[in-house]
Image (tube, rainbow, N blue to C red):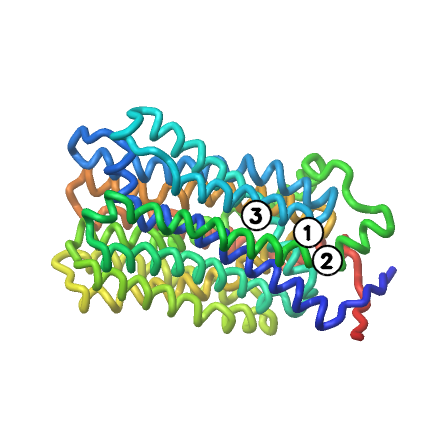
Amino acid sequence: MITTIEITEQRRGRAFRGAITGHLIEWYDYGVYGFLAVYIGKLFFPDNGDGTQLLSSFAVFALSFFIRPLGGLFFGPMADRIGRKRTLVLVMIVMFGATFMIGVLPTYASVGFLAPVLLIVARCAQGFSAGGEIGTTTSFIAEYAGPGRRGYSTSWLMVTAVLGLLLGGLVANGLIAGLGDDAMLSWGWRIPFLIAGPLGVIALYIRLKIEDSPEFEALATSGNESKAPLREVWQWRRAIALIFCIITLHASLFYLVLTYSSTYMSENLGFDKMSRLLLVFLACLVMAVVMPFGGRFTDRHGRRGLLLVSGVLATFATIWFFQAAHDATPWSFLAPLLAVSALVGLYASSTYATMSDLLPTRVRSTGIAVAYNLPVALFGGSAPLISAWLVDKTGDIASPWYFYVATCLLSIGGLIALRDSDFERATVESPALAETAA
């Protein structure tokens, strides 16, 4: 049965602006911490030598990712029961509130061990929010886009995530370059977190103006929305397992480029501040530019082929990235960094659309929240910590490539197992919408 939902260009534009603006602020908030990890370590943890402050800072970074599945389990079913819009509003409030909180926290020098405890609470709140953001926003955008446009439309969520992290990096690294280490350690580190307050209020206002997705409205109108999405989603175990595998490469290499690479170039390669800022900016720019092209390509030619080819090439590029680190200069390191960035951009351009295509509307937000957040917690948030630990234990700055290549191989295995019938099953069980323009 076809449900007619009037989707004007004005309504679609308002929906995309609300989702994208909030997503930008979410990822700005989440990314700032990664770029300031060195300062956070020095300010919030005791110095026991042997790089423990940096490792402690990355451990808190990783911990927030392990909270993400809990946030997904809370917000994902909520979005499938009460709608995408109201869930997106709640997620936004939690995220920018937690980020602003970090900006006013006392440091270890002021309150001792209470400082890292408060930092952990704030980071866990960020992780809880981020766990709900992905499934809800992806479902929202995919359902507004409709079949045949999901790759291109959801690729802009990834572009926005990159731009949000880039914005956080530009603010953080710009302050570092302009103020210097002493001022950053004294008070400058707070500024990027405090900015989240006014930015979050603006994004919240925009999200309050959006309408729910047409597919969810069709379900709600017919009374067919899921009453127990967390229980129902396990009928889609194969889809969840496939998404889990496909996302591992996305998770590990995405955070390699956008968060860990800056610290890696500083702590292990000895690059100066301006070189790091330029390299990270170029990497983010390349990644963001290729994403819409990858999304459009998979709308026309299918998801699996591009994901498989870019995944294999990204595996080899990652090995090059770490092997090139020996005696690297900013100039010699540019090519492997951009190669990884471009290939991760192509790969990540279609992962959100693939998740949306593999799950029906009734449990889409819950399914994505479960299947996406687990590999991101295991292989994304822990990537900087595992990388720093490997370098510390082996003394070899190239040693992290073992971890990243293992995640790539898991994704390649999932893509090999992916079948057309996996997509067809979800399509049959989602409402068909006849779109009208006004």
Q: Is residue 290 visible?
A: yes
Q: Quadrant of residue 185?
A: top left
**Horizontal relation, residue 193 to residue 298: left or right:** left
Residue type for callout 2: Glu
The quarter of the picture where residue 290 lies is bottom left
Placement of 373 over or under 246, stated as above or below: above
The secondary structure type at the circle numbered 2 is loop
Disc on the earlier residue, 1 or 3 = 1
| Disc 3 residue type (three-letter) | Met
Give the CA distance from mark 1 to mark 2: 7 Å
x and y, in percent, of residue 179 in the image: 23, 55
Q: Is residue 359 left or right of residue 180?
A: right
Label located before the other in sequence (2 or 3): 3
Counting from the top left corner in percent of width and height, residue 100 is at 45, 44
| Dot placed on the residue nearer the N-terminal end, 1 or 2 | 1
Which residue appears at 45% of the width and 58% of the height? 164
Instruction: State the residue position of label 1.
Output: 85
Vertical side of 346 occupied by 105: above or below? above
Quadrant of the rendered image containing residue 213: bottom right
Q: For this rendering, which residue is in front, 204 or 61?
A: 204
53 left or right of 209 in image: left
Task: Provide the secondary structure element on which disc 3 rests.
Answer: helix
Disc marking residue 211: 2
Mark 1 residue type:
Lys
The reply to whether callout 1 and callout 3 are in contact (CB within 8 Å) is: no
Tell me which residue sits at (26%, 59%) in the image: 321
Examine the rendering and report whether any part of residue 339 can be seen: no
Q: Check contact, mark 1 vs mark 2: CB within 8 A.
A: yes
Residue at image mark 3: 92
